[in-house]
Image (cartoon, rainbow, N blue to C red):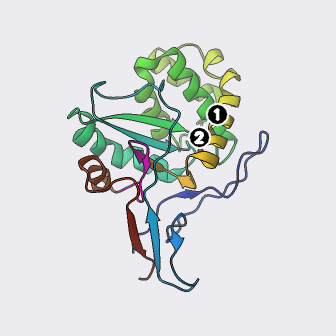
Amino acid sequence: MRIMKECMVAGLLIGGGVLVGCANPSTQNEASVTEESDSKTETFTYTKFDLPLANKVYMGDMDAKHEIVFVFDYSCPWCKEWIDQVLPVVEERFISSGEAIYKGQPLVLLNQDSQYMANVDYHVEKHNPDDYYDVQKQLSQDFEHADWATDDYVDAVSKQFGLVGVEQLTSEEGIEVGIQNSRAYTRDMGVEYVPTVYVDGIKLFDSFNVDEIADMMNGNLSEGDVIEVDRSE
């Protein structure tokens, strides 16, 4: 049984507030129990979603056949771990090879820092798209920085990358966009936890399993496939 590294979504954004818990559960909560409640076997169905990312800035070759989407929250430590450890492998195996493009979509799920950083992310993508993914990596990497998610921190990052000024990066224009995105993904796109990864719109079972990404891209897995999940030790 694998140990899941996820921040579980306990509720939806209501107004400007957040109802979410962050945990490291040992079971896959999006799977459905196939027998009685004490059954050790669950199933997971690979489901395709129409992700609203047609105009999203992407990393990779525009002629790539596949699309990998990483949905995350800037305040989620497991999301930081994914960016630190899994994204470099994804870049080497699938992006640099021209097989897939990559899109990273932050949501506002966990706390006010999530909202602040998703808003900054929105403005970087809008005003400095060429620097977008370098900045996204930096924002995640600095998660434990003392000034993280403050105007002083954003000002320093802006100067580091030559971005627009901190006033533009922190204007409230992107806040409502972030909230609406989060509602849409949790309500309509199957997001029950972060990080969540999709390949060609199909939600994966294990966000940290790079081989699962490969299996989806090469046809070993496809929409509608069902796998059994053993919850026992």
| Label 1 Cα neighbours within 10 Å, binned few <14 / some 14-19 / many ≥20 | many
Q: Is mark 1 on a helix, strand or loop?
A: helix
- Specify whether residue 204 is painted magenta: yes
Residue type pointed to by label 1: Gly
Residue type pointed to by label 2: Leu
State the residue at coordinates (48%, 39%).
Answer: 140
Q: Name the residue under label 2.
A: 107
Q: Which of 174 and 37 is in front in this view?
A: 37
Q: Name the residue under label 1.
A: 178
Secondary structure that dominates the magenta span: loop
- Specify whether residue 45 is painted magenta: no
Residue contact at pointers 2 and 1, CB within 8 angstroms:
yes
Q: Is residue 22 above or below residue 151?
A: below
Q: Indicate left or right for 66 with 32 as reference.
A: left
- The mark that comes first in sequence, 2 or 1, is 2
Residues in magenta, as a range? 198-208
